[in-house]
Amino acid sequence: MKRAPVIVHPPSTGGRRVTLYGHDLGRALRPADVAAKLRRAGFCTTEFVWDDTGVFEWRDGGPDIWLMP
């Protein structure tokens, strides 16, 4: 099975870590932060479809989960 290029890691102190093809892009506190980080890294699209499993892997919660349980 092919791995999604964007991984949004589990919530932790300071937000969720975002990686693109294994490269750390930093932490995000909301979906807009993820989009900004991806665009800065050159991963551009007109619109991000957060539930596209071919692009995104959300670990321990989707785009609506940002705080630690």
Image (cartoon, rainbow, N blue to C red):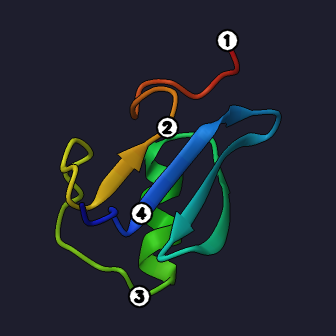
The kind of secondary structure element at disc 4 is strand
- Check disc 1: other Cα within 10 Å, few if <14, some if 14-19, many if 20+: few
Q: Position of residue 63 (x, y in %)?
A: 40, 34
Instruction: Please name the residue shown 52% across and 40% down the image.
Output: 30
Is disc 3 in contact with disc 1, using a CB cutoff of under 8 Å?
no
Q: Which residue is mark 3?
A: 42
Mark 3 or 1, nearer chain start: 3
- Check disc 2: other Cα within 10 Å, few if <14, some if 14-19, many if 20+: some
Q: State which quarter of the image contains the N terminus.
A: bottom left
Residue at the far right: name it: 13
Nearer to me, 23 or 31: 23
Q: Which residue is mark 4?
A: 6
Q: Amino acid at mark 4?
A: Val
The kind of secondary structure element at disc 1 is loop
Nearer to me, 56 or 34: 56
Could you give the CA–CA distance between mark 4 and mark 2, rounded to whole angstroms?
11 Å
- Check disc 3: other Cα within 10 Å, few if <14, some if 14-19, many if 20+: few
Nearer to me, 29 or 19: 19
Mark 4 or 3, nearer chain start: 4
Foreground mark, 4 or 3, reads 4
Q: Is residue 14 left or right of residue 60?
A: right
Q: Which residue is mark 2?
A: 59
